[in-house]
């Protein structure tokens, strides 16, 4: 209705000077007219210009007087022709009405105010009410009245917005239906040739992007990465989840009968089930050290099998990458190195509230001549104090590839107890020497899970709330930033 009124009016008229007037003359709702104007303008059927006007609206008090009459008139009408005592009149009226009414009526010289109150004039005109009703009906009041009603707080200013409207470049007396999508059917029928398409609105605001939220694990991992980099460590390339048993176990002097190498603990790959290439001369030396030892070691005295070493698996620890990095290091003239990695590992474990079949490991290692256990303890203190854990204890432990090995504990102020936070050790000569590293080169290393500190930091007690298909997306969108080592 509004649209038809606007378009047909413009057919025979130059412009609609004022949308408010236009609406009022036709009994149309101005809000609806405005919506249609905006839509027609969007399609360039019309050109528009804003009109802003200051208008007046009744306050709550103004509304009551527009209905019941001004206080002065209410008071005036309450006075009988013979007059009335002040007390009697007061009883007849609301206290506020009496107060305002008597002062305004006095100002208007409607009353004789002695002991007795009586009318001074026969008839009075309730101008206040009349002007209020006028304003309510959208008519323009006179400046003098506006001033009076404004000081009495019976009206308040309001900005009125409307438009003046002219034909636009796409003007037509009736809106054409434009296509918004080019469909498969349009293509098949060929009617796309005759269709008129809606123009792109490059200024329209899009949906707010929903993506791009960092998971808590990524935030903690980023902080750890900064700590390693500040300590001068280089990141190892951990972008392969699939490794061979050789790099994951054999190179680390982990015997082939070791229970961790069972399919109950490790995910082996069906396809490709084996690795294609290994450095043959090094493989020979690893076989030798497992079977009969060397460099002062007796080895494990069993028959080492190549097909076992060839089996592909999902790496069970990032130490599978450390072994390759050390092997590469050993192939060149020796250089000391500090390496780290933070990435995913997999273990065939029963899933419960603290264990998943995949998790992330943080690993650091330092490779240099003549390092001692004291260096390891010193580096661990340095590293963990940067995470905010300066109270550490160590407990002897066992790893096939480190000797000595130490579990790391930290005193948790919140839990009021010592909690295990990592594992560490010095890589065995049985691992380093077959690689070709010089005899006096030692490697100190440690590893920890990323999930553990993340769960503590973010107050999550079930790992399935942190990782996996049951995670609440709200957590990903709203989790706070992470700063490690700030108490
Ligand atoms: N690889 C060990 C683990 O899986 C962690 C570790 C890394 C231990 C380096 C000692 C040295 O838990």
Image: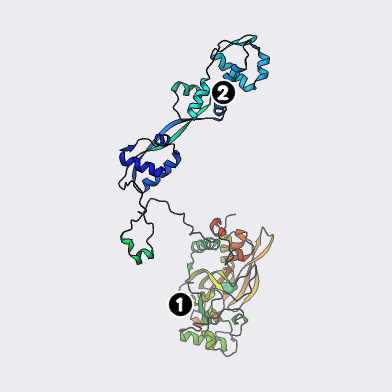
Image position, residue 445 (x, y; %)? 55, 71
Q: Secondary structure beneath disc 1?
A: helix
The residue positioned 65% from the left and 9% from the top of the image is 115
Judge left or right: residue 404 versus residue 187.
right
Q: CA distance from mark 2 to mark 1?
A: 98 Å
The residue positioned 59% from the left and 65% from the top of the image is 470
Residue situated in front as seen by the camera: 392 or 200? 200
Image position, residue 63 (x, y; %)? 55, 29
Q: Which quadrant: the C terminus?
A: bottom right
Q: Is residue 442 visible?
A: yes
Q: Is mark 2 within 8 Å of ligand 1?
A: no
How has the structure been colored for display?
rainbow
Judge left or right: residue 171 versus residue 328.
left
Image position, residue 291 (x, y; %)? 57, 89
- Please give the residue where the numbered disc 2 appears in the rendered image: 69
Furthest toward the bottom, the residue is 303
Residue situated in front as seen by the camera: 287 or 266? 266
Q: Secondary structure beneath disc 2?
A: loop
Residue situated in front as seen by the camera: 401 or 50? 50
N-terminal label among 2 and 1? 2
Residue situated in front as seen by the camera: 27 or 451? 27
The number of discs equals 2
Image position, residue 122 (x, y; %)? 56, 12
Mark carried by residue 328:
1
Judge left or right: residue 140 versus residue 286.
left
Q: Which quadrant: the N terminus?
A: top left
Disc 1 crowd rating (10 Å Cα; few below 14, some 14-19, many 20+) is few
385 w.r.t. 311: above or below: above
């Amino acid at each position: 209705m509004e649209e038809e009124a606007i378009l047909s009016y413009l057919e025979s008229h130059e412009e609609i000077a004022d949308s408010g007037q236009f609406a009022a003359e036709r009994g149309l709702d101005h809000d609806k007219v405005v919506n249609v104007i905006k839509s027609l303008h969007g399609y360039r059927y019309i050109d528009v210009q804003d009109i802003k006007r200051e208008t007046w609206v009744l306050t709550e008090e103004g509304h009551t007087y527009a209905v019941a009459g001004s206080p002065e008139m209410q008071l005036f009408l309450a006075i009988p022709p013979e007059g009335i005592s002040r007390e009697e009149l007061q009883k007849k009226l609301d206290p506020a009405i009496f107060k305002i009414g008597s002062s305004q009526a006095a100002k208007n010289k409607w009353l004789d105010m002695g002991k007795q109150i009586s009318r001074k004039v026969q008839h009075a005109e309730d101008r206040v009410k009349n002007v209020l009703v006028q304003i309510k009906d959208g008519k323009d009041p006179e400046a003098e009245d506006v001033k009076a009603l404004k000081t009495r707080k019976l009206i308040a200013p309001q900005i009125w917005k409307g438009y003046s409207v002219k034909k636009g470049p796409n003007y037509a007396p009736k809106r054409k239906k434009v296509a918004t999508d080019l469909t498969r059917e349009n293509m098949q029928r060929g009617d796309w040739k005759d269709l008129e398409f809606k123009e792109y609105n490059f200024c329209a605001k899009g949906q707010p992007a929903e993506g791009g939220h960092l998971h808590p694990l990524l935030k903690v991992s980023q902080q750890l990465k900064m700590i390693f980099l500040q300590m001068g460590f280089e990141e190892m390339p951990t972008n392969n989840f699939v490794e061979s048993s050789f790099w994951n176990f054999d190179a680390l002097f982990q015997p082939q009968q070791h229970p961790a190498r069972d399919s109950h603990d490790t995910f082996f790959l069906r396809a490709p089930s084996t690795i294609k290439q290994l450095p043959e001369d090094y493989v020979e030396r690893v076989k030798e050290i497992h079977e009969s030892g060397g460099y002062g070691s007796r080895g494990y005295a069993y028959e080492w099998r190549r097909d076992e070493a060839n089996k592909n698996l999902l790496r069970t620890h990032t130490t599978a990458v450390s072994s390759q990095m050390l092997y590469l290091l050993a192939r060149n003239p020796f250089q000391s190195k500090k390496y780290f990695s933070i990435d995913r590992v997999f273990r065939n474990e029963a899933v419960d509230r603290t264990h998943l079949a995949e998790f992330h490991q943080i690993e650091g290692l330092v490779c240099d001549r003549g390092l001692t256990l004291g260096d390891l303890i010193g580096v661990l203190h340095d590293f963990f104090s940067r995470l905010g854990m300066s109270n550490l204890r160590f407990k002897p432990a066992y790893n096939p590839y480190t000797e000595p090995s130490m579990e790391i504990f930290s005193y948790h102020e919140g839990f009021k107890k010592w909690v295990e936070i990592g594992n560490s050790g010095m890589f065995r000569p049985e691992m380093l020497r077959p690689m070709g590293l010089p005899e006096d080169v030692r490697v100190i290393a440690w590893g920890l899970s990323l999930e553990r500190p993340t769960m503590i930091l973010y107050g999550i007690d079930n790992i399935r709330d942190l990782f996996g298909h049951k995670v609440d997306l709200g957590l990903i969108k709203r989790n706070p930033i992470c700063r490690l080592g700030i108490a």
